Image (cartoon, rainbow, N blue to C red):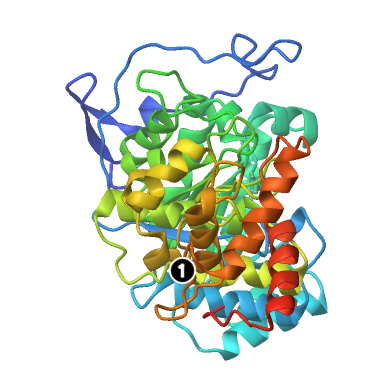
Amino acid sequence: MENRKVYFDKHTNLLQLEEHMYPLVDVDTPNVFRNLFHYDEIPKIAFNDRIVPHSMPDEIWITDTTFRDGQQSRAPYSTEQIVTLYDYFHKLGGPNGKIRQSEFFLYSKKDRDAVYKCLERGYEFPEVTSWIRASKKDFELVKDIGMKETGILVSCSDYHIFYKLKMTRRECMNHYLSVIRECLEKGISPRCHLEDITRSDIYGFVIPFCLELMKLMEEYKIPVKIRVCDTMGYGVNYPGAVIPRSIPGIIYGLRVHAGVPSELIEFHGHNDFYKAVSNSTTAWLYGACGVNCSLFGIGERTGNTPLEAMVFEYAQLRGTLDGMDTTVITDLAEYYEKEIGYRVPSRTPFVGRNFNVTRAGIHADGLLKNEEIYNVFDTDKFLKRPPLVAVSNTSGLAGIAHWINTYFRLPEGKQVDKNTELVTMVKAWVDKEYEEGRVTVLTDDELLAVIDDACRQLGIELTGEK
Ligand SMILES: CC(C)C(=O)C(=O)O
């Protein structure tokens, strides 16, 4: 009886023995959940109305995959760029380590150089962790570098087990367990990436497998992490939705039926159905301590959960930033644009060029009277990005003056107003554009060119904090 865990099942009101409840179901043919996923139909969301209780852990955090999933989907970063980004993550996450870990490839010399350089920084957070091929050689590498933990791929849906690995569930589970045992033998903590969990048989494969993993953790006294990978973005957060698509249901099953502690559960989302952010927040709410994110959501296909979004989700859930420095998000966006040559799409929340730009005349009027009316929060304080009013035919002299003052961040005393000659000159150009039939708003670049020209004619310079 020693190794068997007994737990109280709230659904049945009975004490249950775990391994008797959830033996591996070794099916002959793959269960691909055709009722939900018919490839030539749009996937379906089904409901059984079983409601899972919230269980947000006392401490929650963010982990980062910018250099792993993020880098998989774009041109590789240079070593110097990785180190700079890592410095920024350290500052953004703050002294409480809200960006707890960042994962790195170890495949090439270049990958390893970046790891050595980041380790040399000596930061406690984000902890540098790895992603490797599950082989003896790679385990040794992890150990030699001095890392405590590594990610290992343990794909768990029958799509992967039968079609990709060409194994049975039993063969696959035995294979994974032997690899993880090898990792533990080396004294390294495995982070098990349960790829494609939202198309997997949760109680026929995932829970029996995680029960075995928890036994290995007990045997080796080394933490075994479970990363819940919503690889194709099928996860949903709706109360009463059925597993395997229900994120609350998956997290509940792992915690209650497989006995995985919250601090060892991490959610990794993809944005194929626009749900990466809400699914990640849901994972926190239902008992995962960690959400794994990539900066600006850059990742495979539609991308991962954007890291910056979860910083603001954190603050909204907890009522505090717990030491995170959100202004670094703007520094990161500028660094990407200037040094990496990537401009975040302009309407992207918190970072896009236009995320707090008001264009409609009627909104602009409200914003000019009181910025709280049309700005989500004090974006100048938290992101060094005061709200802007785009200039159009309805802007008037005051709107143009506001645009110049905010765009150039002109300090009081140096600000222009509706009587300034520069503003009159720009207004004359704007009016002419619309008289000639223009129907669209003016772009920043167009305005900058006109302002530049007018300043030259007037022999003045706009000196702001930019
Ligand atoms: C490769 C796996 C682990 C992954 O990143 C995912 O499932 O999204």
Residue shown at 63% from the left, 19% from the top: 27
Residue 210 x/y as whole percent: 47, 42
Q: Quadrant of residue 82?
A: bottom right
Residue shown at 59% from the left, 79% from the top: 462
- Which residue occupies the foreground of this view, 353 or 22? 353
- Which residue occupies the foreground of this view, 299 or 397? 397
Q: Is residue 78 above or below residue 434?
A: below
Quarter of the picture holding the N terminus: top left
Mark 1 and ligand 1: say if the CB distance to the nearest ligand atom is below 8 Å.
Answer: no
Q: How many numbered marks have been drawn onto this rendered protein structure?
A: 1
Residue 363 x/y as whole percent: 44, 39
Q: Is residue 209 visible?
A: yes
Q: Is residue 375 visible?
A: no
Q: Is residue 92 above or below residue 276?
A: below
Q: Quadrant of residue 130?
A: bottom right
Assign a secondary structure to mark 1. loop
Question: Seen in the image, is 109 located left or right of residue 149?
Answer: right
Quarter of the picture holding the C terminus: bottom right
Q: Amino acid at mark 1?
A: Lys
Residue 111 x/y as whole percent: 75, 74
Residue shown at 45% from the left, 66% from the top: 99
Residue most extreme to the left: 13
Question: Seen in the image, is 453 located left or right of residue 95?
Answer: right
Residue 257 x/y as whole percent: 34, 34
Q: Which residue is mark 1?
A: 384
Q: Residues within 10 Å of mark 1 (few under 14, many from 20)?
A: some
- Which residue occupies the foreground of this view, 233 or 296? 296
